[in-house]
Image (cartoon, helix red, strand yellow):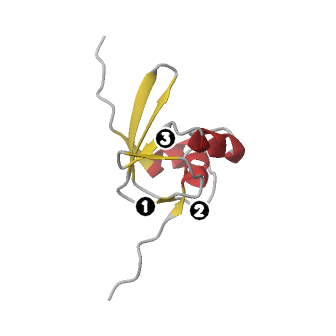
Amino acid sequence: MQGPSPSIRLDKWLWHARLCKTRSLAARLVASGKIRVNSARVVKPATPVRIGDGISYARDGRVRVLRVKGLGVRRGPAAEAQLLYEDLEPQVSD
């Protein structure tokens, strides 16, 4: 049998992926109820996130939709952080 799949706290993942400037801001964003994981509204910063989960939230007048590709072990440079997710937003052509 295989054990449970690895996971990370949602607030920590948002911080590692550089979607929030600080971990406390990430926790506040989650607690506000503006984040959805796999289409379910979450309000607990400790909500587990796994590879393959979908995350959506509204920010700056638009909705961001992301797919978790990695969990991360640290808050690294932006190039490393972008490897943690896939942006599922449709591309707008000008």
Q: Amino acid at mark 2?
A: Val
Q: Position of residue 40 (x, y in %)?
A: 39, 47
Q: Position of residue 62 (x, y in %)?
A: 43, 23
Q: Amino acid at mark 3?
A: Ile
| Dot 2 and dot 3 residues touching (CB under 8 Å) | no
Question: Tag 3's secondary structure?
Answer: strand
Up/down of 20 relative to 48, above or below: above
Circle 2: is it few (<14), some (14-19), or many (20+) Cα within 10 Å? few
- The quarter of the image holding the C terminus is top left
Which residue position is annotated with label 2? 73
In the orientation shown, which residue stands out farthest toward the bottom? 1
Q: Amino acid at mark 1?
A: Arg
Q: Position of residue 8 (x, y in %)?
A: 54, 62
Which residue position is annotated with label 1? 50
Circle 3: is it few (<14), some (14-19), or many (20+) Cα within 10 Å? many
Query: Dividing the picture into quarters, in which one does residue 32 lie?
Result: top right
Question: Tag 1's secondary structure?
Answer: loop
Which residue position is annotated with label 3? 35
Which of the two discs, 2 and 1, labels the residue nearer the N terminus?
1
In the orientation shown, which residue stands out farthest toward the top? 94
At horizontal 30% and vertical 25% (from top left) the residue drawn is 91
At horizontal 41% and vertical 72% (from top left) the residue drawn is 5
